[in-house]
Amino acid sequence: MSRTKVETAPADIQLLCADAVAKASGADSTKILPVSSGKIDSKTYQVELDASGKKTSCLVDTDGNVKSVQPT
């Protein structure tokens, strides 16, 4: 059995996504929790978040620019 290395998004990137979801949805940012994250390519991370039961996906680049916030 082999394991693959999954590179998760750094904490500051996850917090940027949580803040972006809060602004987009009007939700309290303290209620938005990152559930999972991973690197899409060399400059982009995808972060999956739970905003009080509402699943949201966020794409952010390594410079901290939020590319998209989408409900899932």
Image (tube, rainbow, N blue to C red):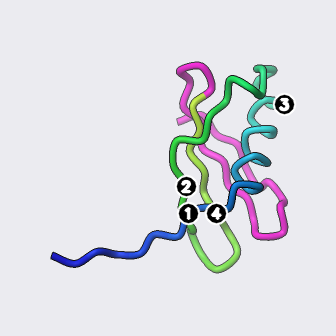
Q: Secondary structure at mark 3?
A: helix
Q: Is residue 32 above or below residue 36?
A: above
Give the residue type that dot 1 points to: Thr
> Is-magenta flag for residue 68?
yes
Count of numbered tags? 4
Disc 4 + disc 2, Cβ < 8 Å:
yes
Q: CA distance from mark 2 to mark 3?
A: 20 Å
Report the disc number at residue 45. 4
Q: Are marks 1 and 4 in contact (CB under 8 Å)?
A: no
Q: Nearer the viewer, residue 2 or 45?
A: 2
Mark toward the start of the polypeptide (1 vs 4): 1
Q: Of the residues shown, which amino acid type is indicated by label 4? A: Tyr
Find the magenta span and give its range: 51-72
Q: Which residue is mark 3?
A: 23
| Structural crowding at the residue carrying mark 2, measured as other residues with C-alpha within 10 Å and reported as few (<14), some (14–19) or many (≥20) | many
**What kind of secondary structure does the magenta stretch mostly adopt?**
strand
Residues at marks 1 and 4, CA–CA distance in whole angstroms = 8 Å
Q: Residue at x 56, y 44 (%)?
A: 48
Q: Are marks 1 and 2 in contact (CB under 8 Å)?
A: yes
Q: State yes or no: residue 58 in magenta.
A: yes
| Of the two numbered discs 1 and 4 in the rendering, the one whose residue sits closer to the viewer | 1
* Secondary structure under the numbered disc 4 in the rendered image: strand
Give the camera-side residue of 28 and 25: 28
Q: Which residue is mark 1?
A: 8
In the picture of the structure, the residue carrying the numbered disc 2 is 37
Q: Residues within 10 Å of mark 4 (few under 14, many from 20)?
A: many
Residue at x 75%, y 66% (from the top left corner) = 61
Q: Is residue 13 left or right of residue 3?
A: right
Tag 2, which secondary structure? strand
Amino acid at pointer 2? Ser
Q: CA distance from mark 4 to mark 2?
A: 7 Å
